[in-house]
Amino acid sequence: MNAQALLSLADDELILGWHNSEWTGIAPFLEEDVAFSSIAQTEIGHARAWYELAAKELGTDADSLAFDREPDEYACSPLVELRMAEDWARTIARHWLYETADSIRIQVLINSVDGEIRGLAEKIDREETYHRMHAEMWAERLRDEQAFRDAVDELWPYALGVLREDQRPLLCDAVGRNEVEAIERGEHTEDLRPLWEEMTMVRRSVPGASW
Amino acid sequence: MVTVERVWEALAEIPDPEIPVISLVDLGVVRDVDVDGNRVHIGFTPTFLGCPALEVMRDQMAERIRELGAEPDVEVLTEDGWTSDRITPEGHRKLRDSGFAPPSGRSPVTLLQIQTTTNPCPYCGSSDTRLDNLFGPTPCRSIRYCNACRQPFEQFKTL
């Protein structure tokens, strides 16, 4: 697996983890405050693991990959860039679509011939089981709410863009929707830059410092 | 001269940074120990990848090896990673004694299993408990509630 593919995975998890953490303190229930904070923590942990593998290939370290690149150099999908706090219906729609897409991608990696990738994918999949359970419980609960249905309609082309083209039919089957034109990786949304500025602010304040 | 047995004993004295009632050996994160002259190799399998205690565990193991007068080499293993099945029976007992419900069932787990498996309350032993939140104060714990003694408790996740 090449470094660019690893970076797509890591960037998706880092950026989504960051957005999930925006619910800390303002979620609609205390339980969800805890849940989104914990999910954010594990997503960022997964990002770190993938960055570490990419860093070995690129001769750098995980923190540099996470925080020292320019916004244009990130390889994340537009789905994870969108800022959704304080819209709960959109947040749950993205959470459910992303976790469903992510599980398809992880299943492919579990069959990798590279032992390191396979081992990591198996481990991440076990942790992600809890994210999926949480997303499915919420999707079930909001299924008949108009705000949630509108959000799923809006985000569907973005969700397809998380996956490689050959993996997209699996996502269509999993969520019961037809394939449409995907919003692909490459072009960034305008929500990425403000997030990047906040996320890298401390690191940029004293370049080269060890924390 | 450091022996493999001495290293295991030393590691068994290191408490988990977040649940100090159990040791790193009880937790099952030490996969193997090799001694080659003055060099001690430890194969370490992290619990949750986002767990902030990992660095602490790694540093504490290295520190203990240095105290034994040897040179530590702590390797993080990603293949054949940690599951909650690796927590020892002794670890289960210690968790229960301090009010943590140990992981129930075996990995991998489904939502249906979590909702239907009998998870006894670590305080009163009643099986009349329910899931309150899949997530808890650290990545490795869920929150359950005991209907019998009306006490919320922390459940180690089955992973």
Image: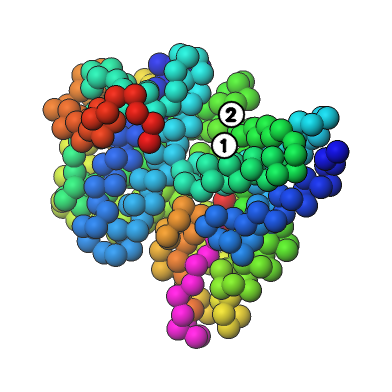
* Residue kind at label 2, given as amino acid type: Arg
- What's drawn in magenta, residue-wise? B147-157
Q: State the residue at coordinates (23%, 30%).
A: A205
Q: Is residue B157 above or below residue B122?
A: above
Amino acid carrying label 1: it is Glu
Where in the figure is residue A138, as x and y percent of width and height? 32, 55
- Do callouts 1 and 2 mark residues in contact (Cβ within 8 Å)? yes
Residue B30 versus residue B16 in the image, above or below: above
Circle 1 sits in a helix, a strand or a loop, which is it? Answer: helix
User: Residue drawn at (46%, 14%), measured in percent from left and top?
Assistant: A58
Which mark, by number, is residue A118?
2
Residue B143 within the magenta-colored segment of the rendering: no
- Disc 1 sits on a residue from what chain? A
Residue A208, percent from left and from top:
34, 24
Give the position of the N terminus of chain B as an image quadrant.
top right
Residue hosting label 1: A122
- Look at 74% across and 50% down and name the residue there: B10
> Mark 2 — on which chain does it sit?
A
Q: Quadrant of residue A12?
A: top left
- Asked if the magenta segment contains residue B155, the reply would be yes
Horizontal side, residue B1 vs residue A96: left or right: right
Residue B65 lies left or right of residue A82; in this view the side is right
